[in-house]
Image: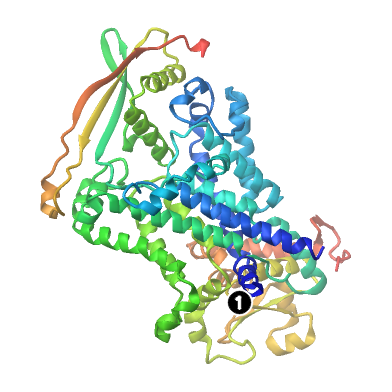
Amino acid sequence: MSLLRPLVKIAIALFCLWHMAAVGVYSLQNVDKQPVLKWLEGKQYIFRPYVLATSQWQRWNLFSPDPLRRVTEMRIDRQIFETWMPVRNIVFGELGSFRRASELKVMRRMDEDNQSELKDQYIQDICRSDGLLPGTPMRIIKRVQVIPKTEGPQTVQWWMEWQPEWQETLDFETTCKNTLTT
Amino acid sequence: MKRLLTILDQFFFERVSASGFGLMRILWAGTALAFLLGSAPDIIRYWSDAGILPRNLGYLVFRNEYRFTLLDTFTEPLPVLLLWCTYVTTLFCTLFGIWTRTMTVSAVLLMFSFHERNLQPLGGGDTLLRNIGFILMIAPEIDAFSMDRLERQWKYWWDTGKLLPALKTHIWPYRLLLWQFLIIYSTSLWDKLQGTMWLDGTTVAAIFHHTHFFRWPKLLSDLLSFFSPYVCFTFLVYEATWLLLLVPRNIWWVLPERVRKHSLKRWILCGGIFFHGTIALLMDVGTFSFAMFTGYTGLLLERDFAVLKNIANGWWLRKTRNYTRETNGKISVLYDGDCRLCTRSIFTLILLNHLGRLSPVDFRNAASRKRFAPDIALGDLDRAMHIRMPDGTTLSGFDAFRRMTWHLPALWPLAPVLSLPGVPTIGRKVYAVITANRKRCVEGTCAKDENARRTP
């Protein structure tokens, strides 16, 4: 018992050092110009199995290096007798408090990655939940504006006069598929 | 060599209070639960094959190596729903501390499963909850403030009249948590310095005009833009300050005594509460601010709790300093030691007495009654619980309870409610009904005979 105790302690201390090294090294990013950090970043493969298997991957780039300036909104329309009718509006004000961050994140990732399969799947999910008939034409209308990047801080007056310039484009078109097959 | 081992032993295995981790367990489960229940309409959409990310499209979103999730096995809507219900149940049990260890481990593993199934809706707060969850899962002592401990506490108190010794644990989970925060702030600072807008002081104005995040109308974001350069600069400095926690404490002797006596960590945590509180107020960034607060509670040690207690008691101690010696600056709570319900109630009050302002007095003990309440008739004491304030004021029944809520931090949210018009009238009636029946009820069953045998 007396021998086991120090061994357990050593094992715990070594595990702590390993964990600290793993999450530290695996969090390194944008270190190309720093030789030491660059070298450490090159060792990430050692920690990769541990960090990924324990779901400890992380990247703390919220609003950095520069904040997200592109503001995207999406509207999903369905066609009824040649007329397009909105069925979903993915904008801040129309989503519940607890769902807002997640749903806007889904939309941003769908937009940034520009994966048509994900957009199609997003629409098929709406077709299913709204019980739309197979073959119903659907489309995504994207509204985008970019917050200006200025040389330095602007005055309150400047911001009050600034108005977003929205650009609306047809982003994606598809039709509802047979929901029973999915 | 021996000296080195001693230092390492002290560094990882110093005994510290487990209360911080107990609080962190509660906040972790509460935050995860609130947002999980809030996203209930999206269970099938986010996590089943019938949703927005069926597994055959997974290659677009998630990796395929070292990835483990139960939701690769349970893919249809009904099993996913059942797994989600299990997840909610484990979080509830973790929150209240029922089968604490088993439920915490299960909740953490289920969190990993849900997060690994679909990365699309995840934000920084979810990542931090996962990181904190991992540390909670492996921490040796997370039982503080749990129902499990409450049961043991009651038995011990009933047998000895004392509470169990405060829970202690090794410090290594605290070190891992502190390291996690250092990683967050230092990598975040590094990343910010790679761009130009933080250094230009224009970031905050831009974020405030981003309609995915800012909660309030444009006019407010326009006005707040004035502070952009100051907030940018302060936040960069704040993030850099976390690195000072890497400096060993015994090097701080170079600083003047007036500076040294204050804990840098506490000031940093106060700054974090201010920053992340402001972010939560102004912006919608999901669970992020709440996850940060959750992690902060795990960084609290005995010294920090003592300082918090001193701050909370400062005004009270000043106010009561000149009062009677009998009460010792405390509120005497006179209760019936022969009544099981009263004893249970006083036990609950003692558990909630984190500021140490209450002093229970069994009025069945003649000496105690003579000392603390010589002027109150036994019959009156028998009819309702009495409290004697340090200035000699006496209150009884519902009014006594209402006054005590202001002195028990866990009941602070209840205190203003009890003073709302109409509530005292109802409260006094309810209290009268309870006291009229209190001696009939023993261990959950109520005898018809008022003289029914009372269990000691």
Disc 1 marks which residue? B356
Point 53% across, 63% down: residue:
B299
Does A53 sit left or right of B366 as displayed? left
Percent x, y of residue A144: 23, 31
Relative depth, front residue between B399 and B198: B198
Of all chains, the one bearing label 1 is: B
In front: B106, or B309?
Answer: B106
Q: Secondary structure at mark 1?
A: loop
How was the colour assigned to the protein in this rendering? rainbow
Q: Where residue B76 sits in the image (x, y, percent)?
A: 59, 22
Which corner quadrant of the image does residue B157 belong to? bottom right
Q: Is residue B140 visible?
A: no
Q: Amino acid at mark 1?
A: Gly
Q: Is residue B297 above or below residue A167?
A: below
Q: Quadrant of the image for the N terminus of chain A? A: bottom right
Residue B415 to residue A164: above or below: below
Residue at the image position 53 percent from the left and 35 percent from the top: B116
Q: Residue at x 86, y 65 (%)?
A: B455
Q: Position of residue B229 (x, y in %)?
A: 21, 59
B304 w.r.t. B194: above or below: below
Identity of the residue drawn at 50% across and 20% down: B56
Q: How far across and how far down the image is residue A53, in percent?
A: 57, 39
Can the viewer see residue B302 in this picture? Answer: yes
**Number of numbered markers:** 1
Mark 1: few/some/many CA within 10 Å (<14, 14-19, 20+): some
With B26 as the anchor, is B336 left or right in this view?
Answer: right
Q: Give left or right: position of B71 versus B283.
A: right
